[in-house]
Amino acid sequence: MKIPPLYAALHAVVSRMVELTDEEWQAFFDMLIYREVPKKFRLTDVGEIAREAYFINKGLARLYFLKEGEEISANFVFENGFIASLESVLLKTKSRQAVETIEECELLVINKVKLDELTATYPSFNIFSKALAEFAFITLQRRASSFILDSPEERYVNMLNERPNMLERVPQHMIASYLGVTPVSLSRIRGRISP
């Protein structure tokens, strides 16, 4: 099957999770919605029931919590990654986190109802859904472990090793909240680590 350029990145990522037939790929592509959104666009609000997940073809988005009016970044997702308020999508509950773009984004939107219909027709998509949930769990587990075991400086170094483009693309105050430090503390950490 010839993969349309719009879906090439998604095809590469999903192919590592599950083997699909040409018919299954076509059904998957048919259910996706292409959406372009500006930066600082809220895809999911706190308190809203999320009904969509997003594959980022181009751009950058983040998950964050609101606590006493302060935004606390929980994760950043770059090109070729999935983002959603997963708890809300899966449990149909009000979201405790917001999903917002940091840059202009080109998204492939996965509607949960349509994905459920697709899974009913093609059970292979259970493997896809399971792989996404496992990845989200591992990401969350690593983040929780880092907050328990690592110092803020170690979290910063790990972030740079895992995502070297964070400093170029993510505002400093968002990185500080992601690391669990103040912007002033982040500046000090950067000063100590920079050559």
Image (cartoon, helix red, strand yellow):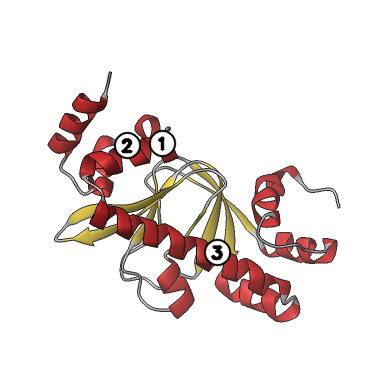
- Residue 76: x, y in percent? 40, 48
The residue pinned by badge 2 equals 157
Rounded to the nearest angstrom, the CA distance separating label 2 from label 3 is 26 Å
- Label 2 environment density (alpha carbons within 10 Å; few <14, some 14–19, many ≥20): some
Extreme right residue here? Answer: 1
Q: Residue at x 37, y 35 (%)?
A: 160
Extreme front residue here? Answer: 149
Residue 173 against residue 116 in the figure, above or below: above
Residue 119 against residue 185 in the figure, above or below: below
Which amino acid type is shown beneath numbered disc 3?
Answer: Leu
Q: Is residue 170 visible?
A: no
Residue 23 against residue 192 in the figure, above or below: below
Task: Please say if the residues under marks 3 and 1 sit with CB atoms less than 8 Å apart.
Answer: no
- Secondary element under disc 3, as helix, strand or loop, is helix
Q: Which mark, by number, is residue 194? A: none
183 displayed left or right of 6: left
Which amino acid type is shown beneath numbered disc 1?
Answer: Asn
Q: Is residue 183 visible?
A: yes
Which amino acid type is shown beneath numbered disc 2?
Answer: Val
Q: Which mark, by number, is residue 161? A: 1
Frontmost of labels 2 and 3 is 2
Rounded to the nearest angstrom, the CA distance separating label 2 from label 1 is 6 Å
